[in-house]
Amino acid sequence: MSTAVTPINDLVLDVLLRDSVIASIRALRADDEDALAALNARVSLRTRMLRYFSVSDQPGKWYVDKLVRSERGDGALVASVGGQIVGLAGFCRLERDPDTADLALLIDDEHQAEGLGALLLEHLAARARHQGITTFVADVLIENSAMLHLLRDSGFAVQTTSSAGVSVLLIDLTEGPVLWDAVRRRDNSAQRTSLGPVLSPRSVAVVGSTRPGSVAEHVRHALLGFTGTVVLVDKDNPLTRPVDLLIVVVAADKVLGVAHDAAAAGVKGLVVLSAGFAEEGPAGALRQAELVALCRRSGMRLVGPNCLGILNTAPDVRLNATFCDADPREGRVALVSQSGAVGVAALRHAERSGVGLSLFVSTGNKADVSGNDLLAYLQDDPRTSVIGLYLESFGNAQKFTRVAAAVGRTKPVVVLKAGSTAAGAKAGMSHTAAAATPALAIAAIFHEAGVIQAQDLPEMFDLLSVLASAPLPQGPRVAVIGNSGGPGVLAADASTGAGLVMAELSTATRAALSGLLPSSAAVDNPVDLLATVTAETYAEALRAVLADPGVDAVLAIYTPVTGGAEAPFASVLAAAAAANPSTPVLAVFPGVGMAPGGLLGPTGDVALPFFEFAEPAVRALGKVAAYAAWRTLEPAPRSYVLHPKRRDRARALLDIESGWLSPVTTTGVLEAYGIPTARTIAAVDASTAAAAADALGYPVALKAAGTAIVHKTDVGGVALGLETAAEVRAAFAGMRKRIGPTMTSAVVQRMHPAEGALELLVGLTVDPGVGPLLLVAEGGTYTDLLDDRVVRMPPANREAAWEQLASLRCARRFGGYRGGPALAVEGVVDVLMSLAAMALELPALLELDLNPLLVTPSSVSVLDARIRVGPPIPVQDRGTRSLSRAAVR
């Protein structure tokens, strides 16, 4: 089987150019020869000279012929606009160095300076990486400044030498933060240009019924405050004038016709509220694909279909293009919801709670505009400081990880992800694949991206409130102050589970509190001011606690005994927080359902996070503190080294078999990557098993082998501590009888001393939506029962590998537990880094289990391993850009 994979294969990827034009990129086909000849003939003599070093058309013909007829694994992509091929990118392997390939780009004169060359380079590099190519080489005329700038600004590491008017550029195709950042910046710029007329339009039209009470009429009424031009269009009459944004509220079977009219009129974007598309089955999915294809051909962006609409509170826009009557205040929170119903709840909550919004977008079926696109747009939005997302699917999870991580460095991203509880375990899966449930895969993405994960809608709103109205804490140390003991104790109990630390108040702070309070008050944390405390004394005590350098955040609790008693306390809390703008203060008023007026600003917006109960406040603060800590960490570059010879040796072994590999092949693959394995001898019958045991020395372990055997212990396929050849023969015979023909052979290993050792499960699996995931867990027979496991994306460096290991409960044993010796954990880190390289270099590797990986005080060793290979699962490269794949061709 072949281990090479083309990321694009036969897919057509729509891409967004710098000026909002939408192009398509796909692999070169043999029937493209005439269209490419036309492209070569169409370009100017200068473009031809810069590309082919000649004004003759003959080099272009030779080059196209070479690409079309190549049988050496060369690759080429074409880009089209309006059905016409306007770009060509190709590479040809060097015979002297098959890891290196010549690079060539040709862009139609009319589409130069639109960013098409950078897009083609990104996708071509991804294609080359998956074919084992590590370097592009490009010969560029020194006068071709545009191409030199394109390559040097691409995000790839480039080395340049020049002579005789030609620059030779060596382009390292390795992915990493520099490339991802360059891709992100290009995407952000294109998205802001493309989505600007949709999210901040100057003119809007509504197509739909004029019947009173209809959805279209609700939208028209909501648009009364819009600062731009509103064009009213009856559902039976076509739009004839250009507008920035068209709101479509007609029957599903009429939407395509309206979109045709919109394209002809020069509309820049559609918001389709109508249902009846992919959410209703195959016929609706086809209708949706046709709509997207039309929008892509016409350069229109599409929000929806099946959505609630969009809202922009900017004073110079004041757009409410929804059919929800909520009227949230202007603020700093942007909300994106895939669900219309959740969107309604969010808008009503924002209006009621006083959390101000900058932007709201209901993406619905997100056939075109996705949460990823909106994240890219919002990163540079000056009116947004906090982003909340309700997602039911990721789409391109790799892009989400890249974009969310970049956005999160300056703006917190809170995500509530639905649909994460599906059972992930299946009997035929490896431990790793079964353990990497949707919930753990999502957690791995969020951990990588620094996303704050909400468990439910109330917590999502809690988090947004804290982030929008309080500074980030500088650490996890929290002080609790209140007028009664019970809520304070509950808050203290909740803090440990939330990852917070109860701050130790300084001697000076305790002395200040003692001078303010009766002797019966508690001046240690949690501080109990007693039920008789006045608002003035509460204010002084709160100021004393806020002044303590050992306090990173304060939970201020006031339990009113009578209705309305909370009002003066709300005012002093807000004043104290305003006087200490670097320390977050969360206000808790048990039994009070709405924020007291004293916590609200002059326009009704929330000036201080408000909670009715302490526990949700503590949980929200804990997640915000963890996010603040993540933000202080600098993204580290990948530190593991890729070795083509090692990769090629492993790939040669993978080509021998498919499905679950034999023990011998599995050991060979692991040894190719330097992963230590226990000495193992294969045996096909009882006699060869006994001979193997004699050669290894007793005691030995005997393990059944067979491609259909995944969990050997479950079928009675493991015998340990065998002391004699007779015991080995008897064990082999017993296994074969129990398991039957599924057992095709066995392996024999020398027993390893287990005293003081730790068994780990380490594994890889490929999630179709996420990509490679790496699992570490306490291993052995009871790994599922212990449920001590952490799933992450493969580590980029040793620090990330250590962090994953340290997240295990059993990590307490690493440094020596209860007088025991420290374990050789650096060896485990080596294994994790080798697996990270395997995940990148071996796309045919679908599942891998090392269980157990035995960790002793002096060494690590794999005692049992399983590897499954197959056709690579296409996962979009993090170093590429494309729009959602909803269109049909």
Image: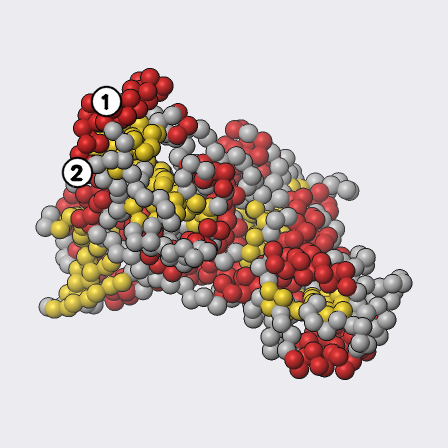
Decide if residue 236 is in sight here: yes
Q: Is residue 266 left or right of residue 112?
A: right
Q: Is residue 635 left or right of residue 567?
A: left
Given the image, on which type of amino acid does mark 1 rest? Ala
| Mark 2 or mark 1, earlier in chain | 2
**Quadrant (top left, top right, bottom left, bottom right) of the C terminus:** top left
Name the element at disc 1.
Answer: helix
Residue found 64% across the figure and 48% down from its top: 456
As rendered, which of 351 and 769 lies closer to the eye? Answer: 769
Residue found 71% across the figure and 42% down from its top: 215
Mark 2 neighbour density, 10 Å: few (under 14) some (14–19) many (20 or more) = few
Given the image, on which type of amino acid does mark 2 rest? Glu
Residue holding disc 1: 686
As rendered, which of 202 and 815 lies closer to the eye? Answer: 815
Q: Residue 476 is drawn in which quadrant?
A: bottom right
- Where does residue 226 sit, x and y in percent of width and height? 68, 59
Decide if residue 80 is in sight here: no
Name the mark nearer the viewer: 2 or 1.
1
- Where does residue 359 sit, x and y in percent of width and height? 62, 58
Q: Is residue 224 left or right of residue 812?
A: right
Residue 44 circle label: none
- Where does residue 470 sit, x and y in percent of width and height? 64, 68
**Quadrant (top left, top right, bottom left, bottom right) of the N terminus:** top left
Task: Using the image, determine if residue 456 lies above or below residue 410.
Answer: above
Mark 1 neighbour density, 10 Å: few (under 14) some (14–19) many (20 or more) = many
- Where does residue 683 sit, x and y in percent of width and height? 22, 27
Residue 71 circle label: 2
Q: Is residue 823 left or right of residue 392?
A: left
Numbered label tally: 2
